[in-house]
Image (cartoon, rainbow, N blue to C red):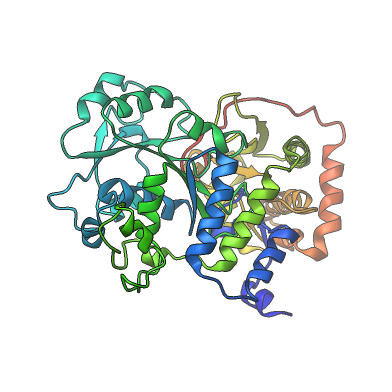
Amino acid sequence: MTVALDLRGRRVINARGNSTKVGGCVLAPEVVAAMAEAATYFARIEDLHEAAGRVIARVTGAEAGYVTAGASASMTMAAAAAIAGLDPAAMNRLPDTSGMRNEIVMIRRHRNDYDHALRLAGAHIVEVGFGHYEWTFPYEVESAIGPQTCALFYLANDPVPSVPLQEFIRIAHAHSLPVIVDGSVALPPASNLHALIGMGADLVAFSGGKHIQGPQASGILAGRRDLILSAALQHQDQDVYPDTWPGRRLVEQGVISGPPHHGVARGMKVGKEEIAGLIAALEAYVRRDFAAEYAGWLRDLDAIVVGLDGLPGITAVRLDPQPDEIPQTPIVQVAVDGARLGLTATDVVNQLAAGDPIIVPVEGQTRRGLVGILAQALLPGDAEEIVAAIRALVVGRAALGAGGDVGAGVGAGTPAGRGAGADAARAGADGAPGVGATASAGASRGGGL
């Protein structure tokens, strides 16, 4: 056993996509190699950020880019940049924004747990529209803009946008205000890496550890050069002296009046290993075969649907994303009939988590009797183990109801039970109907179902 495996404990099957709470993604060898190489040398961090920023700008089409500690950090830094601009005195005050332009306008249905990242910088959120209804009109957005407005915010993966992003940007720019876009789960499609900037967004936050498959503690902030500079100055180690500060040319050029002190994002620092790993992943991202990856997801999901077919109290169907849905990720929706099965969807999630390996599905709709299974992070053999584990739950529950021995229960999903479970899944799939039900899987900042 290694230190890493000792720390991990039970193996985890990640059926909830590239989610932070289960480690994001498995890194490609070239990403690991880049991080390992970076671990062997010293570098001025501002130099690494500048070089990495050039790569991000090239790939995204933005004026500038920056490696952050994650999409949430990107949003905090974006808000800080919108509030403080290039005023070092204002940077030094954040998150105290009293007397400053500190309001960020957003559509009310775009509110979510993650917009705390904006408030962390001292922003005050001004909501527009009616909750989850699709009744927000462009004039309402415009009327919410006032003398204290510093920026507008947009959630890229709104499944039914009441105000399209292009119109939202037009309104903001008519008032000379920047638009911050949360694109953390806007990938796939990969085209959004440059499409959001192409629409005119001023700052876009991407996750580095999800579909890009970079280090989990990494993200991207791409956009206007002046705003990226402000974000960088509020993020980097500013234990500097004016006469020897590597950025003193900014003072000489009149860009900024002097170096700020440590900024509001100082605690969100990124190491040289994360910078190198993220850029290696980003360079690889533009070369990946996304069609082949998507086909692999469908194969795994279809295997799960077929493997669960015929189980009493369980109905599994594959939901494919609509053409304009973000992110473009299919999902298996498992409907649990609690009355028939004797287990609720919540029970299923908790029992899968109690097994060995731990199986972590999407649990956001368990109160509606639904469990989601995403394929982006499944490893070879994981789909069969998921089927075996769920079948073991159902069979065990049936045996318990009949007064029999529950037996191994979820243990059928362990390595010892893997072959038998897969055989049972295949046996249960004989003569199963074809899979291909298509519906909108929905979306939220947290990952849909």
Between 314 and 197, the one nearer to me in the picture: 197
For image coordinates 85% across by 56% down, the residue present is 420
Q: Is residue 415 left or right of residue 206?
A: right
For image coordinates 49% across by 38% down, the residue present is 368
Between 431 and 386, the one nearer to me in the picture: 386
Q: Which percent across, then down, holds residue 183?
A: 48, 41
Q: How many marks?
A: 0
Corner quadrant of residue 374: top right
Corner quadrant of residue 417: bottom right
Residue 30 seen anywhere in this rendered image of the structure: yes
Q: Which percent across, then down, holds residue 117?
A: 35, 52
For image coordinates 79% across by 53% down, the residue present is 380
Q: Which percent across, then down, holds residue 411?
A: 73, 63
Q: Is residue 208 above or below residue 6?
A: above
**Image quadrant containing the N terminus:** bottom right
**Image quadrant containing the C terminus:** top right
For image coordinates 30% across by 20% down, the residue present is 138
Residue 406 seen anywhere in this rendered image of the structure: no
Between 199 and 206, the one nearer to me in the picture: 199
The residue furthest front is 252
Q: Is residue 100 left or right of residue 276?
A: left
Q: Is residue 200 left or right of residue 61?
A: left
The residue furthest left is 99
Between 244 and 356, the one nearer to me in the picture: 244
Q: Is residue 216 left or right of residue 230?
A: right
Q: Which percent across, then down, holds residue 8?
A: 63, 71
